[in-house]
Image (cartoon, rainbow, N blue to C red):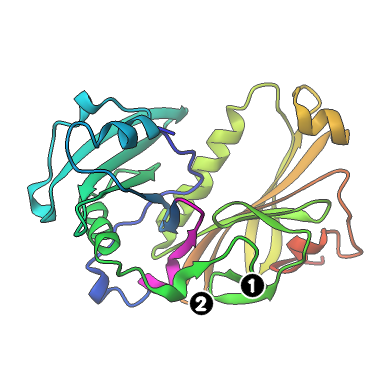
Amino acid sequence: MRHFFVLFVLCPIVGFSQDRGFETRLQSLQNTDAAFHTIDGYIITSQLFENKFDAKGLKKPARKYELNVDELKVSDDSLGHKNYVVKSSKIIADGIVQSDTYYFVENKEKNVLVVGLSTMDDPNPAFERRFTKMLLDNAIPKSTYTTMEPDSINFAGRKFKRSSSCYWTFLNTLQCPYYGEISWSVHEKENTASKAVAAQFAVTKNRKNVKILQDDEVDIIFESVPVKARKRVLDFTGVTGLLTAMSGVKTLTAYYVVAPVRGNYVACVLSYWDKDQINASGLPPLLEEVMQLKQP
């Protein structure tokens, strides 16, 4: 795909060697033919093609990302490898612009590595270049990788057991049918985590045929930290689609949270449908893993 859908936004990153929290904020996943990474609101994909770095060899990688070889014109001389860089942007919601950068690079084996970096904040070229170099040098820490069916979930530095019914819908987005869903990113700074939640508010607001039934600020305990969360109840009865048709769901309850967690800041959206299992705590099982409602 040429564009990624991103929930969270970037925070500027200094040199990784000086950034002690880098490894704690990075989460990676190796799929069959591509790798995915998320850090500080960037969504990053990397894919290797066994093609030569020439006009003919670049056709397939370019098509994969809905690009034409003729668009591969600009190079980044500071990268230290033959490369082309393509940048684009699009409006996701009112005041929210998604920026995408694509690196087409010749690696040491003379094959083509494509790196896509996407963010909803101002792009950080220094970070994008540095992360691309790490991918070229195979320098992504192995400790940051998870699997498609992990025994446990690394939630911002704390692990909890994954139920067999739960699965990734995307990196750092865990869905458990009838038990809820959580989607999160880990940030170095609080203001960028707050921007992440604000961006998700805007995206939700722009969805067609979705009505906001409730919008309140509530007190919760998130990873043992007392914080304020934004609670929204959304009416999906006007939305047509396979999910609503098959399950008969009508409303989605979502909590939007920014909290300091183990030396970083977590931006998190926790949600459940009206048909989900709600325990005595007032929450479904998955949400209970990371939050509690504060009793009056």
Q: Which residue is mark 1?
A: 223
What residue is disc 2 on? 262
Q: Secondary structure at mark 1?
A: loop
**Residue at image x 88%, y 33%?**
248
Within-10-Å neighbours for mark 1: few <14, some 14–19, many 20+:
some
> Residue visible at 81% across and 56% down?
179
What amino acid does circle 2 point to?
Answer: Arg
Label 2 residue SS = loop
Q: Are marks 2 and 1 in contact (CB under 8 Å)?
A: yes
Residue drawn 42% across and 74% down? 142
**Magenta highlight on residue 264:** no
Q: Amino acid at mark 1?
A: Glu
Q: Which residues are magenta?
A: 22-33
* Apparent side of residue 25 relative to residue 62 in the rendered image (left or right): right
Q: Residue 67: x percent and y percent? A: 32, 28
Residue most toward the left?
77
Residue closest to the eye, 27 or 50: 50
Q: Quadrant of residue 173?
A: bottom right
Residue 224 can be seen in this image: no
Q: Residue at x 81, y 67 (%)?
A: 295
In three-dimensional space, the C-alpha distance between marks 2 and 1, rounded to whole angstroms, equals 9 Å
